[in-house]
């Protein structure tokens, strides 16, 4: 099969379908995609809520709940206890397939009828304000995290504790504001760094301790702004960089940014991996166009947040934990196999177009089903009936496709249409990765949710906070602090925030100035340190003498997430190694 170029149904840009893509589609018996890889990921990530929490009432038991679903919507949202109980039967909402109407229209009606969990998660201790967490304790506003404790405003923690404002951080303790880090101890503002301790403002550092404002270091000690000092001199100079002071913290942040821009960077963050393209890749092989693919991802394409033995998977967003043969899935994990066009599932096999399915197989268009086989639109069939119906439905989806408000056509082989998602674009996982304004989203025919009318009485303006954390009194925990962005950014600004007692103690212990931004704006600021999920073909920018390229500038090419108009200096792996390692 030859490589083919197609025009994306959504963004109208052309994209390539590689011979090995065709082989995979053939193997799993699906037609080739009509959307480009980026639009496909955006569409999947629109099917999962990111981190907006609401208060509501369980539609089954009437208990007060915290939920990811905006109140007043068309869905039947029930509390975790009810959801996991036998008080209701998902098959009681089952319906026969109507061969006269598009599948996705029927699916949306089922979505509104079948109960959905207010929040997901299991084994939670004092962690009511968390979603999609497993085995967490004393966590608040923590999402998609596992085996972690004492954390606030964090996203994707694994085996970490005493973590505040962290994003994708593993095996760490006493960490503040980290992004894509592993095994940190007592680190403030670590980015893409592993095995570091007692350090602040580090980027792409490994095995370092007692470093401040450093980039591209390996196994170093007592470095300040990358410069080597004796232990005594390091600590003497460090006195100036007192991050307990907000003014000094801002000064350090700005100096770090300039150092970041004047220092060459690796074209991609790739560790112990072979034959890969993408970014943020560790212990992975034969993976192309994969982003955040960690620990045993093999023979995969277009994976975004995959890990722990994910094999033979194309178009997987948030997936892994021993899964294979996945295509167009979002948050389908846990020993999954042959799951297609599905969202949120665990331990499932041979599923199509399903959401929140658990321990089920041979299901098509089902919602919230558990321990079931041979179901279509939540209706039970025999094995024989299911096998007869399935090809007829695939054919019917070809003949009577769903057409959205903008004329995009959805036949068998397309993931769910964005306009049918249960979540607004700006509340979904897609939003931070593919930021769009309200006008753009509405123009696409998709949902946007304006923040509900703010009734916060701001009792303390951010500019009136004491400069130094040591001058902050316990009474701060009773204040409603205004966010310095005042809601005018496009970052889901909540306009105000509170500081909890545990958080205040953490800031004091770590000597970090109190934030002036709300958690959403802080998160957006941190995410600006990572690149978007798009690859660009570029050349190494190195012209240093003494490298393998001799007196000529390096001619090495690579695929990188640094777009051509970016200001960073980008090196190939060899030049990076020659210069820094
Ligand atoms: Zn596209
Ligand atoms: Zn804000
Ligand atoms: Zn070079
Ligand atoms: Zn080079």
Image (cartoon, helix red, strand yellow):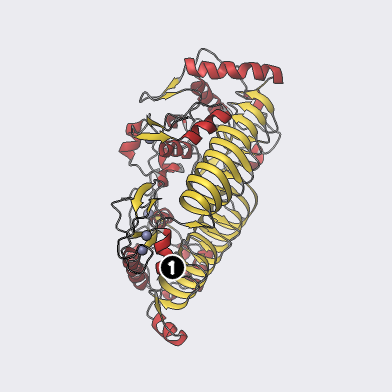
Q: Nearer the viewer, residue 139 or 44?
A: 44
**Does 467 sit above or below residue 134?**
below
Estimate how packed mark 1 is, as few (under 14), some (14 to 19) or many (20 or more) residues with alpha carbons within 10 Å: many
Q: Position of residue 275 (x, y in %)?
A: 50, 49
Q: Nearer the viewer, residue 100 or 49?
A: 100
In the image: residue 427, left or right of residue 247: right
Is residue 67 at all visible to an observer of this figure? Answer: no
Q: Nearer the viewer, residue 78 or 101?
A: 101
Q: Where is residue 503 in the image (x, y as percent from the top left)?
A: 51, 64
> SS for tag 1?
strand
> Mark 1 sits on what residue?
202
Instruction: Locate ligand 4 by image quadrant.
Output: bottom left
Count of numbered badges drawn on the protein? 1
**Does 360 sit above or below residue 427?**
above
Q: Position of residue 268 (x, y in %)?
A: 43, 55
Is residue 257 at all visible to an observer of this figure? Answer: yes
**Does 233 sit above or below residue 86?**
below
**Farthest residue, direction top:** 100
In the image: residue 222, left or right of residue 90: left
Q: In which quarter of the image is residue 472?
A: bottom left
> Looking at the figure, which quarter contains the C terminus?
bottom left
Q: Where is residue 82 in the image (x, y as percent from the top left)?
A: 65, 38
Query: Looking at mark 1, is its residue's CB closer than 8 Å to ligand 3?
Result: no
**Does 389 sit above or below residue 46?**
above
């Amino acid at each position: 099969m030859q490589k083919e170029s197609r025009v994306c149904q959504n963004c109208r840009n052309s994209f390539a379908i590689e011979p090995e893509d065709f082989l995979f589609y053939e193997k799993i018996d699906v037609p080739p995609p009509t959307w480009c890889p980026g639009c496909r990921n955006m569409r999947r990530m629109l099917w999962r809520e990111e981190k907006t929490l609401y208060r509501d009432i369980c539609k089954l038991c009437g208990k007060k709940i915290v939920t990811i679903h905006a109140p007043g919507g068309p869905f039947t949202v029930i509390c975790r206890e009810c959801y996991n109980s036998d008080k209701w039967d998902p098959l009681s909402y089952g319906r026969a397939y109507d061969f006269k109407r598009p599948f996705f229209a029927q699916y949306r009606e089922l979505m509104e009828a079948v109960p959905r969990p207010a929040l997901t998660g299991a084994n939670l201790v004092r962690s009511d304000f968390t979603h999609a967490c497993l085995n967490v304790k004393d966590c608040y506003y923590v999402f998609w995290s596992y085996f972690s404790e004492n954390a606030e405003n964090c996203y994707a923690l694994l085996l970490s504790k005493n973590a505040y404002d962290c994003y994708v951080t593993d095996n760490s303790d006493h960490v503040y504001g980290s992004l894509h880090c592993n095994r940190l101890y007592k680190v403030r503002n670590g980015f893409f760094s592993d095995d570091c301790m007692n350090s602040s403002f580090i980027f792409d550092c490994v095995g370092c301790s007692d470093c401040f404002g450093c980039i591209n270091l390996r196994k170093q000690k007592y470095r300040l702004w990358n410069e080597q000092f004796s232990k005594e001199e390091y600590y003497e100079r460090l006195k100036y960089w007192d991050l307990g002071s907000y003014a000094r913290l801002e000064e350090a942040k700005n100096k770090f940014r300039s150092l970041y821009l004047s220092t060459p960077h690796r074209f991609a963050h790739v560790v112990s991996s072979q034959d890969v393209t993408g970014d943020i890749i560790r212990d992975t092989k034969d993976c192309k166009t994969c982003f955040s693919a960690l620990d045993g991802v093999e023979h995969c394409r277009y994976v975004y947040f995959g890990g722990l033995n994910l094999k033979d998977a194309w178009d997987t967003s948030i997936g892994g934990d021993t899964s294979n043969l996945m295509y167009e899935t979002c948050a389908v994990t846990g020993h999954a196999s042959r799951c297609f066009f599905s969202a949120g599932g665990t331990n499932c096999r041979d599923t199509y177009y399903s959401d929140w399915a658990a321990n089920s197989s041979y299901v098509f268009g089902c919602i919230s089903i558990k321990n079931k086989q041979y179901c279509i639109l939540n209706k039970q069939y025999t094995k024989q009936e299911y096998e007869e119906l399935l090809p007829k439905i695939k054919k019917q989806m070809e003949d009577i496709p769903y057409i959205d408000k903008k004329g995009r056509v959805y036949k068998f082989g397309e993931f769910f249409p964005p306009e049918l998602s249960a979540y607004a674009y700006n509340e979904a996982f897609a939003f931070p990765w593919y930021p769009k304004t309200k006008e753009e989203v509405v123009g696409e025919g998709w949902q946007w949710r304006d923040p509900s009318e703010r009734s916060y009485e701001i009792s303390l303006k951010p500019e009136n906070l004491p400069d130094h954390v040591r001058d902050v009194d316990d009474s701060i925990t009773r204040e409603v602090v205004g966010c310095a962005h005042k809601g005018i950014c496009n970052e889901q600004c909540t306009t105000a925030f509170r500081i909890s007692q545990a958080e205040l103690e953490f800031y004091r212990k770590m000597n970090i100035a109190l934030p002036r931004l709300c958690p959403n704006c802080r998160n957006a600021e941190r995410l600006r340190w990572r690149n978007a999920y798009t690859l660009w073909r570029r050349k190494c920018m190195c012209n240093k003498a003494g490298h393998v390229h001799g007196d000529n500038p390096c001619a090495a090419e690579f695929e990188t997430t640094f777009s051509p108009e970016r200001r960073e200096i980008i090196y190939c792996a060899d030049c990076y190694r020659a210069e820094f390692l």
